[in-house]
Amino acid sequence: MGESTSREGKRILVVDDNQDNRELVVKILGKRGYILFEAVDGQDALDRALAEHPDLILMDISLPKMDGYEVTRRLKGMDGYKDIPIIALTAHAMKGDREKALKAGCCDYISKPINIRELPRQIAGWVR
């Protein structure tokens, strides 16, 4: 019971231009008591983050309008948003991509395809 209480009402912004990916993440995390918001591109991600002030952001890297690295850098440069954990959620799994995501300000890196069993555990430690 204590674990679900710590998650209850925590707000997560899911940023991905692929609707199927967003729906999968929303379905997995919605069952665990999180409040979820979605964004479909980089500008939408920035706007939604500023409007909703989430507890965590799952950030796709390859996005239209503005890539996930740029959205992350902008948010990390703003007072009140520096401490929001941003996890890169991306198909970019080449050598150096993890380091590039961390350098941009992401706190963690999850590669696609998403492991539906692991995802809740992977983000649980970042949402307190």
Image (cartoon, rainbow, N blue to C red):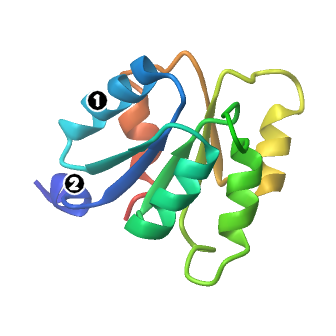
What amino acid type is highlighted by mark number 1? Ile
Q: Whole-percent x and y of residue 92? A: 74, 24
User: Which quarter of the rendering shows the C terminus?
Assistant: bottom left
Q: Whole-percent x and y of residue 31? A: 18, 36
Q: Residue at x 22, y 54 (%)?
A: 3
N-terminal-most mark, 2 or 1: 2
Tag nearer the camera, 2 or 1: 1
Q: Residue at x 69, y 69 (%)?
A: 76
Is 22 drawn above or below residue 65 in the view shown? above
Q: Whole-percent x and y of residue 70? A: 76, 52
Q: Whole-percent x and y of residue 23? A: 34, 25
- Residue lying furthest right: 96
Q: Residue at x 66, y 78 (%)?
A: 78
Callout 1 crowding tier (Cα within 10 Å): few <14, some 14–19, many ≥20: some
Q: Give the structural element (helix, strand or loop) at label 2.
A: helix
Q: Give the structural element (helix, strand or loop) at label 1.
A: helix
Q: Which residue is mark 2?
A: 3
Q: Which residue is mark 1?
A: 28
- Cα gap from disc 2 to disc 1, whole angstroms: 16 Å
Horizontally, residue 71 falls left or right of residue 24, namely: right
What amino acid type is highlighted by mark number 2? Glu
For the residue pair 102 and 36, the one nearer the viewer reads as 36
